[in-house]
Structure formats: C-alpha cells, structure tokens
Image (tube, rainbow, N blue to C red):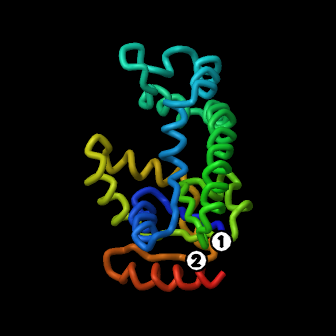
C-alpha cells in the first residue's frame, strides 16, 4: 500500500486537496488535526504536557488545551517548540501506525497523510511520495485572512516566514499541485489518483 504525503504552506489549500482525494474514496488522515485531538484526548500526552509546561497548558475552566497560551510560548522560542514537538510527534506517529494498519487490513490501494511539516519533522522519509500544494503568497494570505479573522496580514506573513521556503518545498516534493485559483485542480488530482492506484 502506497503512503502518500500531502503538504504545503499555510493557505495553499492542503485540506482542499485532501478532501478531493477523500471524495475519490481514498483513506486520508490530517496529522495536524490528530495532534490537536491527541493533546486533548490522550491521558498520557496530557500528563506529559502538564509535567513539561505546567498546569496552565490546559484551561482550568474547560479542561481544553490552552492553544493561544502554548502557541505564544512555542512559536516565540525554538527550544520550547522543540520540547513540545518531542512530546507530540511520537504520540502522533504511534497513532498514525495504528490507523495505517487498519487501512492495510481494509485493502486500501494507498493513503494520504496531510501534514504541514512533513519535511521539517522528517516525516517524508517514511512515505513513498510527497505532494506539495502551492499557491502565490498573496493568494495564501488572502485565504488565511478570510478563514482566520483573528489574524492580521502581518501575522500570516510571519507564519509563512517561519515555514520551509516555497521553492525548497517544491524541490523536495515528488509532485506539485497548483491551487492558485487559475489552473484547474481536479484534473491533476484525478491523474495522481490513477497513477497511485496503478502502484
């Protein structure tokens, strides 16, 4: 069973592409969404986060992850981010292994794993191919501002600046899908689906 990675910078449209593959009957997993779910739902990971960052990492009233508090600290300090990743990435990897085994037993021809940091976290090495979704930076900023009204254009530009440079992401990917609101997106997805089903 082929394991296909799906990545791209913020606002490029990774999730749109993942949903297109889902519509074609392909099992997909959103690693970033699973990470958030595990931080809420895994007792072991919750305990590790509290031990590492203190009780403020979870909201005292709701018990939910205090994402703004954690993000403010993690993204401002590479050491803090590395400590966070050292806790979360192994949990996400173990969760993915269980899910992957389920898809193999079900006879899926291939799966799609969406993750923003496939290359940065060295996840790509465990996959057969990687697709990156690309779009011009002004388009990406416009999309994120429409999706996340709490962000400013400067916020989005800062996030883009912290991500892998677009040319490097495209160089390292096996396939580039353009989601620039100009070129068609469905036809290349259908072509890739046919190629992956052939193995």
Q: Position of residue 70 (x, y in %)?
A: 50, 28
| Residue 162 relative to residue 124: left or right | left
Q: Position of residue 89 (x, y in %)?
A: 65, 42
Which one is in front, 79 or 61? 61
Q: Within the image, what quadrant is residue 81 found in?
A: top right
Work out whether mark 1 precedes mark 2 in sequence or the reverse, and give the earlier one: 1
Crowd tier of the residue under label 2, counting other residues whose Cα lies within 10 Å: few below 14, some 14–19, many 20 or above: some
Image quarter hosting the C terminus: bottom right
Going 37% across and 62% down the picture, which residue do you hit? 140
Q: Which numbered circle lies on residue 118?
A: none
Q: Is residue 152 above or below residue 51?
A: below
Residue located beneath label 1 in the image: 129
Image quarter hosting the N terminus: bottom right
**The furthest residue to the front:** 106
Going 48% across and 33% down the picture, which residue do you hit? 71
Residue located beneath label 2 in the image: 175
Going 53% across and 84% down the picture, which residue do you hit? 194
Q: Is residue 129 above or below residue 149?
A: below
Going 54% across and 36% down the picture, which residue do you hit? 38
Marks 1,2: beta carbons within 8 A: yes
Quote the CA–CA distance across marks 1 and 2.
8 Å
- SS class of the residue under badge 1? strand
Q: Is residue 78 above or below residue 9?
A: above
Which one is in front, 83 or 72? 83
């Amino acid at each position: 069973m082929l394991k296909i990675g799906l990545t791209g910078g913020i606002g490029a449209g990774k999730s749109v592409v993942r949903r297109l593959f889902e519509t074609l009957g392909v099992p997909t997993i959103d690693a970033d969404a699973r990470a958030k779910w595990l931080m809420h739902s895994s007792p072991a990971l919750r305990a590790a986060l509290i031990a590492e960052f203190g009780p403020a990492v979870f909201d005292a009233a709701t018990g939910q992850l205090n994402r703004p508090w954690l993000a403010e600290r993690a993204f401002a300090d590479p050491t803090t981010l590395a400590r966070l990743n050292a806790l979360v990435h192994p949990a996400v990897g173990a969760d993915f292994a269980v899910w992957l085994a389920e898809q193999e037993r079900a006879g899926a021809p291939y799966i799609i794993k969406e993750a923003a940091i496939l290359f940065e976290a060295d996840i790509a090495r465990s996959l057969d191919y990687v697709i990156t979704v690309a779009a011009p930076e002004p388009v990406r900023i416009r999309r994120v501002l429409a999706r996340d009204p709490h962000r400013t254009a400067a916020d989005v530009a800062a996030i883009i600046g912290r991500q892998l440079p677009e040319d490097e992401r495209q160089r390292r990917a096996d396939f580039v899908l353009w989601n620039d609101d100009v070129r068609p997106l469905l036809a290349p997805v259908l072509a890739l689906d046919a190629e992956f089903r052939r193995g």
